[in-house]
Image: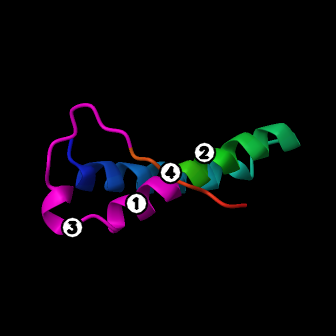
Amino acid sequence: MTYRSKYRQNKKLIQAFAEFLDECTTIEQKIKISGEIGRLQAQNESIKRMPMEETEKEIIDYEIKVTVLL
């Protein structure tokens, strides 16, 4: 998997989670889903800032560090 494919996978997951959000019945479920959407979106923002050649590299043992301010 490359960073580019990780980005596409994250976008699909974000869309699926957003659609599932309406089906959540408790605030705890909504918070968990919203948190996961935020985490994936933060990863994608980090990938967007990478140089193009970096996005094509294979991810073997990757860690995307994200700083989130609420």
Q: Which is more N-terminal, label 3 or label 4?
A: 4
Residue 68 falls in which quadrant of the image?
A: bottom right
**Residue placed under numbered mark 2 in the picture:** 36
Q: Quadrant of the N terminus?
A: top left
Residue 66 falls left or right of residue 28: left
Which residue is at 26% across, 51% downward? Answer: 3
Rendered view: 25 above or below 10: above
Whole-percent x and y of residue 53?
A: 12, 62
Q: Which is more N-terminal, label 1 or label 2?
A: 2
Magenta extent: 40-63
Q: Residue furthest top?
A: 61
Rendered view: 30 above or below 62: below
Q: Nearer the viewer, mark 4 or mark 3?
A: 3
Residue 61 falls left or right of residue 30: left
**Residue placed under numbered mark 4 in the picture:** 40
Q: Are marks 2 and 1 in contact (CB under 8 Å)?
A: no
Query: Regarding mark 4 in the picture, which secondary structure is present there?
Result: helix
Q: Are marks 4 and 2 in contact (CB under 8 Å)?
A: yes
Label 4 – label 2 distance at C-alpha: 6 Å
**Residue placed under numbered mark 3 in the picture:** 51
Label 1 – label 4 distance at C-alpha: 10 Å
Whole-percent x and y of residue 29?
A: 77, 38
Whole-percent x and y of residue 7?
A: 34, 55
Whole-percent x and y of residue 2?
A: 20, 47
Which residue is at 14% across, 55% downward? Answer: 56
